[in-house]
Image (cartoon, helix red, strand yellow):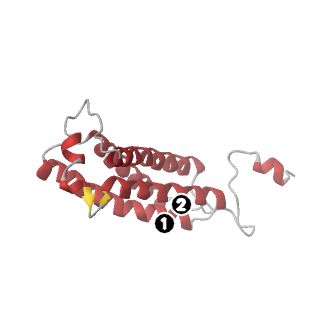
Amino acid sequence: MKNLNQLSNNPSFVKTTAGKPSELPPRGLLVLFLLVALIGFVDAAYLTVLHFLNSTPPCSILEGCEQVTTSKYAMLGSIPISLIGAVYYLVIFLLSIAALDTGRRFPMRAAIVFTWGGFAVSLFLVALQLFVIKALCLYCMVSAFTTLVLFILGLVLLQYKKKE
């Protein structure tokens, strides 16, 4: 019989709580979700840093970065939208780590619920770029794509059923 040290060294081992098998989906899906959230965080944090440095991001593929990031829609009151995005991705990242660390389903479900709001906001912001500002920001589109991937992965994770 394997002891706990042997099991914990096994990469496929997922922690259990109170002797019950973990209710989490496969670890690979959770890690992918976590990595996508990290990409979104880095993208949004980069835009936030540039905002506070009074700089605009360089755009080589799309040429609307300056128009989008300096428009009146780039702020919510006195808060840059990119900062709100960075906090959004950070919360999802931390909830994913909590789910992986504890083996509990609640933090993962909370992260998935956040992606629903993020997806709705992202759709709105892309529509603003296309129809109101009439310019596209490459970094904003990376964020929109990241949010879409998180939303889809969240739907996949919700469909996971514990195998009996």
Provide the residue designation for mark 1.
110
Which residue is situated farthest in the front direction here?
53
Identity, as a three-letter code, of the amino acid under mark 2: Leu
In the image, taking residue 65 as reference, residue 100 lies left or right, namely right
Is residue 37 at all visible to an observer of this figure?
Answer: yes
Name the spot of residue 76 as percent of width and height, x first.
27, 62
Provide the residue designation for mark 2.
95
Q: Is residue 91 above or below residue 142?
A: below
Name the spot of residue 66 as percent of width and height, x first.
22, 41
Name the spot of residue 131 as percent of width and height, x first.
12, 51
Is residue 157 at all visible to an observer of this figure?
Answer: no
Name the spot of residue 144 as percent of width and height, x first.
31, 49
Q: CA distance from mark 2 to mark 1?
A: 7 Å
Say whether disc 2 or disc 1 marks the residue closer to the N-terminus.
2
Q: Which label belongs to residue 14?
A: none
Dividing the picture into quadrants, the one containing residue 62 is top left
Q: Is residue 152 above or below residue 110?
A: above
